[in-house]
Amino acid sequence: MRNKIFVTCLTSLLLISQGCKNWLDQLPINTVTEDQAWKTGSDAEGAVAKSFAIFRRALAGLTKDDTPSTTRNGAWGDYYFWGDARSGDWITPNNDGDWQAGFNNNLISRTQLEPMTNWRLFYRAIEQSNLVLENVPNITEGFTAERKAQLLAEAHFMRGMAHFYAARVWGDIPINLSARNVTPLGREPLKDVMEMVVAEADEAIAVLPWMYSGTRKKVTSRGTKGAALALKAHALMWLKDYQGASDALNQIVEEGTFRLAPIEGFRDMFDTGESEELIFQMFYDASIGEFSDYYGHIMTYYLTNPYTSRSNLSLAVPRSKILEIYPDYARDQSDKRVAEFFQSIDFSVGENEIRPIFADPLANGERQIMFAKFRKAKDRSYNLMDGPVPIFRYADILLLKAEADARLGNVNEALVNLNLVRTRAGIPAFNKSDQPLLIEEILEERRRELIGEYQRVYDLVRLGRLHEFNPAITEQGEKDGAGFFPVSDEAFANNPNMQQTYYWQFNQ
């Protein structure tokens, strides 16, 4: 993309020749000109696959390959820094200046954080979806009418998904519905963006199946009816349409395709991406070169020996914060999630040996507890890490529905879904029917259950409450847009319609 964020740079497409069964197992590899690209169903399959592949890269973050304005040799796992870092729950045990700047909302002063302000890859995913929606209707060979409709629905889903994700990061964003739009576009109100996302989700819901055949980590890395309903519900929560959100979420619950995994199934969910609880994820596969160079995966900042060759931790949740978040564990160690999400390492063992893991997950004191919700083999290898980035999973759906129902006054229904998640965790049911207390408990349960899954900041920003948990952000600052990331300088080049978020005009 040129510095006009919407000038079409996709004058060539990278296509694959696989059928729909294996389309997410392949990377697009053959470069062809656009007039050759839209001939058969396999061209359409490859073009849709590419939109998902670009979105997957957008979550990981910009590299030198994407724009010369970044110094990164590999992706950093920007999904964590957008969705978790500023929540007030995290520290940097090795005192990394970039991460501390991120926690403190100093998002412009540190040049290493600048790539996180750039929405280039999200709009490339949007442009690719637009190309599909403009060209695939004209293809008549190589697929059934049903499959053609599904591919178009997946393009609608991805176009909505990319806008939705970007809107949670930047707030007001441009809406781009054309692959060849050369007019500089300004930012649209967040409300209008979320309404557009709901419309895109509705297009997808009407057509997509609940599930395709194949492994969960592949099937849930593409658009399905459940993923589209989850997208719609999340957008409606931003719009404060709690009845609409509850209705959409209820369709997921009643259909029965997804269910809570037992605690014993957490490793399948968070390590391999194979779980009936996962609805939509981006699974990064080392076997096809993802995360195989430089840092690449957020796990390289979470983990240390025995999982990686790191001797210290870059990102962690301090012991005092863990005990605050998980009061049942602090009282009687009943919350089973603490041992699943955190580990303590015997640092007395030599750096070149495989370090043992203590039975007590909080044994390492205040600053050295490893966040191990996502793990890998204990082989001290630094690269080649497989890993899922969960976007929607069933526990999120149950808790989001509980919040929507509680805000609607449907207390009993809210309690049922809240307590399904609490019971799975091994903690007592919550029985208080006072509406404000119930809503607060649901939000705290989302904090406990989804910690490190890139949801917490979005929940707080959606509710205008980030300043309550991050002391670097004031209430007025949040009202002025401090909860959103600043817009990269790249978006302003040759675009007189672009405006910076009000807060970031005065906080350089």
Image (tube, rainbow, N blue to C red):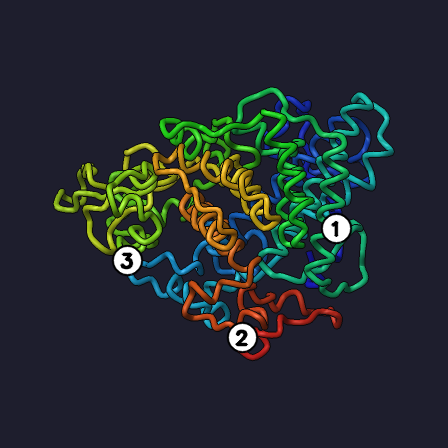
Amino acid marked by disc 1: Met
Q: Earlier in the sequence, mark 2 or mark 1?
A: 1
Mark 1 surroundings: few (<14), some (14-19) or many (≥20) residues within 10 A: some
Comparing 148 with 85, the one in front is 85
Q: Which residue is mark 3?
A: 93
- Residue 179 lies left or right of residue 242; in this view the side is right
Furthest residue to the front? 433
**Residue 341 at what x, y percent from top left?**
34, 41
Amino acid marked by disc 2: Gln
Kind of element beneath mark 2: helix
Q: How many marks?
A: 3
Amino acid marked by disc 3: Pro
Residue at image position (32%, 32%) is 377
Q: Quadrant of the N terminus?
A: bottom right
Q: Nearer the viewer, mark 2 or mark 3?
A: 2
Q: CA distance from mark 2 to mark 3?
A: 30 Å
Q: Which residue is mark 1?
A: 196
Tag 3 and tag 1, C-beta contact below 8 Å: no
**Residue 376 at what x, y percent from top left?**
35, 35
Q: Nearer the viewer, mark 3 or mark 1?
A: 1
- Residue 157 lies left or right of residue 273; in this view the side is right
Q: Which residue is mark 2?
A: 476
